[in-house]
Image (cartoon, rainbow, N blue to C red):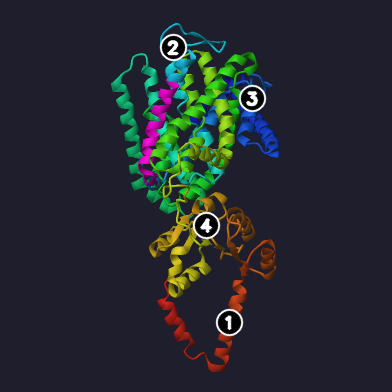
Amino acid sequence: MGVLLTPDLSWASGNGEGLASSHALLTSISVSIIAATVLAYLANLIKQPLLLAYIAAGAAIGPQFGLGLVRSQANISIISEMGLILLLFMIGLELNLKKIKESGKSLILTGILQFVICVALGLGFFLLLGFTIGPPYQYRIFGVKVLGGEYDLLYLAVCISLSSTAIVVKLLYEKFELDTLAGRLTLGVLVFQDIWAIVMLSIQPTLANPRLLSLLENFAEGILLVLISLILSKYLLGYVFRKIAKQPELVLVASLAWCFLICALASYFELSLEMGALIAGAAISTFPYNAEIIAKIVSIRDFFITLFFVGLGMTIPNPLLNLGMLKLAGIAALFVIATRFFSVYPVLYLLKNGNRVSLLTSINLSQISEFALVITALGIKYHHIVPDIQTLIIYIFVMTSISSTYMIKSSHGLQTWLSKALSGIGFKDLHGSYQEEVSRTPKDIALLGVYRIASAFIKEIEALNPDLLPQLLVVDYNPVVYQKLRDLGVKVVYGDIGHLETLHHAGLEDAKLVLSTIPDDILVGTDNLKIINLVKHLCPKAKIVLTAESPTAALRMYEEGADYVLLPNMLAGSHLVPIMENLLRHGGTGLKEKAIQDLAKRAEILG
């Protein structure tokens, strides 16, 4: 009783330190979001990438050379780490092992060799610049005075070899290119890089005195975490999801709970939370609900990722105080971009992926990773490097983040120009090889939502023209519908038809005809007018068939662009007139018997 009556209020004690800390957190978030909104709006007006606006917002309000509106970055760091966790969880959800397997040796060899080649090139480059393996650790490079430490070369080489998962996935997601061959190869290489980064994080504490046993223990713990995740997802999580599948909001909450559970296990095993999030997503990537989870979680992720990049902007040292370091970072940034072409393009080209895919993958990876910032921060902690090296890596990160954003945005034009140049010096494109491809089989007819009318429609197709079934794509979140359609050989995607991301992941862009057979009074969270806008955005050339509950609603849909609007009440009325006449004039002879006979033979999706 005493415990219940005297709750722990220590967070508010000490002259309100806890309460002040909470207010500081809210104030920091508010200022960051407002600054990000203002600069993102201006960036949008002049057609510049929003990501750069977020970094600029952080620089503008940060303590380094901005207005100093946010001086403590600890609170923002917590929020931004959650953004990274959610981002890696989504990457895990996107990891379709079957698709990665289709990429075969191209992905595996590129994932391994890219890092090894980049580290070797990095060691050679920084040695040529003047960095040394042994003392003295004070350099003058291009007239720039740089203080160093014992492990400068190793840290510089490793950090420039890792690419940014946050930047690449965000930009490719916005371009709808994660599911292309180049996108899958890019994502696969990033996963390999994450593994290399985790290896580096594992050996950092014992770098001065490496212990093989400790490293092996970390690998064993990582494998154990993967096994636990796979077992739980197969025997427990699958059962839970089937029980809650009809409630998309609960699916989202359960998915986040699963993500943070595996992150907690990763923390228990002293692994990174980000690695735990990646494993959590990959463990349920084969579930039919992953498209729905991605569609729901993307807005939450974007909020935290915005704060991540704002927080990053706050860490940028004032370049006006060290223009020489800025010059050195610029040269190193150009070298980073070059290393991606030398380490990725030759491997993919020799494995017969052609110029297009090989170049696009190289362009996508042409920046350094946010992991580099984590690695250098730990390097400072362990006295392996000094602040000058950390400043250099931060500048390289910002420069490559900015340049690669523009490169990825215009990757196809850049690839075309580079491909012509390479062809001119003998690197001919490989005919018959993998070029850009769509990883899904295109479907001509998309059916959004399955209720009574759609159930009858599918039955009529099955009876009258079964050859159309393989051309049908269905999006719905009823697990019973999902399983029955799978049994019929129909491609079905579990998800909410009101979400653009769900429809994109389902492959709606390929459809020639899109049908919505559910009227607005039954639809939840969307309506047929919104569906018109979604379809026009994803597949503007597709014909659109909708369902209305009244002539007025139907006319509005026609005005908005519908090609045909189904009115079930009018069809039912016209069908009922001859039935009534038969009953009145002929007594309905045989009518009832025939109806019963037909119904007894009719097994619909929704019986």
Q: Earlier in the sequence, mark 4 or mark 2?
A: 2
Residue at position x 61%, y 18% in the image: 15
Tag of residue 132: 2
Q: Is residue 119 above or below residue 106?
A: above
Tag of residue 576: 1
Q: Earlier in the sequence, mark 4 or mark 1?
A: 4
Q: CA distance from mark 2 to mark 3?
A: 33 Å
Q: Can you say which quadrant of the picture contains the C terminus?
A: bottom left
In the image, the segment drawn in magenta is: 100-123
* Magenta span includes 106: yes
Q: CA distance from mark 3 to mark 1?
A: 70 Å
Label 2 Cα neighbours within 10 Å, binned few <14 / some 14-19 / many ≥20:
many
Q: Is residue 212 visible?
A: yes
- Label 3: which residue? 59
- Label 4: which residue? 510
- Mark 4 or 2: in front is 2
- Mark 3 or 1: in front is 3
Mark 4: which secondary structure?
helix
The amino acid type found where label 2 is placed reads Thr
Q: Earlier in the sequence, mark 3 or mark 4?
A: 3
Q: Quadrant of residue 127?
A: top left
